[in-house]
Image (cartoon, rainbow, N blue to C red):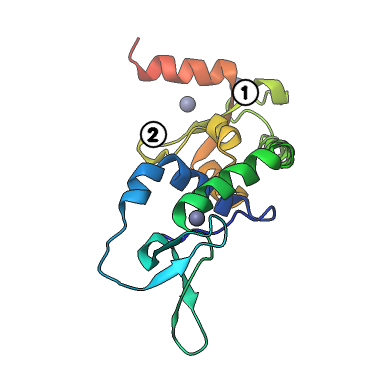
Amino acid sequence: MVRFHPPQPCCDSRREASLIRYANKDQYLAQQPGKDSMKKICGKCKVEKDINCFSKKCKGKSGTQLYVSYCRECNIEYQKNHYIENKEYYINKRNEQKISIRRYINSKKNHCEECGEDHIACLDFHHKDRNEKTFDMIHALNYCVSIKNIQKEIDKCVVLCSNCHRKLHYNDRGR
Ligand SMILES: [Zn+2]
Ligand SMILES: [Zn+2]
Ligand SMILES: [Zn+2]
């Protein structure tokens, strides 16, 4: 059962999950089996609907199933508006994350393992075994990958300057 939570400003990953669900909303709205005959009035549109039109919440104290107060359609609308109204906040937060990711990645680039070049602008991460590569470091920034996963990826790499890196891949290709 897919849960629907209103996005909290403090929780980016949950917001992303709900946005993904929003993107798949047609599929999501289609999951409404009608076997349960309970009804509930939506707190937003005030329409009485089948209980299956509401997403399940955690169980209550006595073990009874609780449901969110807005029907699925209203919940989707609510989440979309929430994002639009708080867009600036989310964009700022994302930019801050990017800055700290960039800082972290740069702090791990000391010098080229081949020639010792140490200018940060020239240094790349090269995957020692390309089969173990999960992502390129550039994606760490674009997708705001967690520091923990970035470090995992860095552990599979050596630092090379752009010249040594190019030469290595050139030789790899067998000229
Ligand atoms: Zn509603
Ligand atoms: Zn080098
Ligand atoms: Zn490489």
Amino acid bearing label 1: Cys
Name the one closer to the observer, 88 or 80: 80
Of labels 1 and 2, the one closer to you: 2
Query: Which numbered marker is on residue 133?
Result: none
| Residue 85: quadrant of the picture | top right
| Residue 89: quadrant of the picture | top right
Q: Is mark 2 within 8 Å of ligand 3?
A: yes
The quarter of the image holding the C terminus is top left
Query: Which numbered marker is on residue 115?
Result: 1
Residue tagged 2:
130
Amino acid bearing label 2: Arg
Residue furthest to the bottom: 62
The residue at 27%/61% (across/down) is 33
Q: Position of residue 172 (x, y in %)?
A: 37, 20
| SS assignment at label 2 | helix
Q: Position of residue 32 (x, y in %)?
A: 31, 58
* C-beta proximity under 8 Å, tags 1 and 2: no
Residue furthest to the front: 47
| SS assignment at label 1 | loop
Check the image and report above or below for 85 versus 67. above
The residue at 39%/34% (across/down) is 130
The quarter of the image holding the N terminus is bottom left
